[in-house]
Amino acid sequence: MSKLLTDDMDIRDTTLEVYLGGNGDYYIELKETKDSEIVRLATRISTSGGNASLDTKLAVANLYRSLQMDCIKS
């Protein structure tokens, strides 16, 4: 999983997460913690068909890799 914590932590506790499902599809998820309750909104980007264009699929894959590199650096 690759994730990025919001730069507005003083306003809300939100994380952007991108992860790979078991079949290789990417999932983009926003996770917000508010009053000890976690709310998740996620969407799946199918890599073997689906609604997304090739450019979108590549962008999501690049975002995933970029966020992984951020996690490694910190």
Image (tube, rainbow, N blue to C red):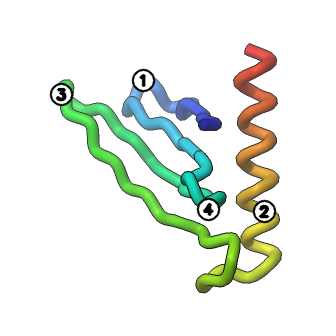
Q: Which residue is mark 1?
A: 10
* Quadrant hosting residue 14: top left
User: Which amino acid, by three-letter code, is at mark 1?
Assistant: Asp
User: Which amino acid, by three-letter code, is at mark 2?
Assistant: Ala
User: Which amino acid, by three-letter code, is at mark 4?
Assistant: Asp
Q: In this rendering, which labeled residue sits more in front, label 3 or label 2?
A: 2
| Circle nearer the N terminus (2, 1) | 1
Residue sitting nearer the eye, 36 or 68: 68
Q: From the viewer's perspective, is residue 64 above or below residue 1?
A: below
Q: Which residue is mark 3?
A: 35
Circle 1/circle 4 CB separation < 8 Å? no
Query: Which disc is residue 25 wearing?
Result: 4
Query: Which residue is at 60% across, 37% downward?
Result: 1
The Cα–Cα distance between marks 4 and 2, rounded to whole angstroms, is: 13 Å
Q: In this rendering, which labeled residue sits more in front, label 4 or label 2?
A: 4
Q: Secondary structure at mark 3?
A: loop
For the residue carrying disc 4, how many other residues have a C-alpha within 10 Å: few (<14), some (14-19), or many (20+)? Answer: some
Q: In this rendering, which labeled residue sits more in front, label 4 or label 3?
A: 4
Q: Which residue is mark 2?
A: 59
| Circle nearer the N terminus (4, 3) | 4
39 displayed left or right of 13? left
| Circle nearer the N terminus (3, 2) | 3
Query: Which residue is at 80% across, 30% downward?
Result: 69
| Circle nearer the N terminus (4, 2) | 4
Residue closest to the far top = 74
User: Which amino acid, by three-letter code, is at mark 3?
Assistant: Asp
| Circle nearer the N terminus (1, 4) | 1
For the residue carrying disc 2, how many other residues have a C-alpha within 10 Å: few (<14), some (14-19), or many (20+)? Answer: few
Q: Secondary structure at mark 2?
A: helix
For the residue carrying disc 3, how many other residues have a C-alpha within 10 Å: few (<14), some (14-19), or many (20+)? Answer: few
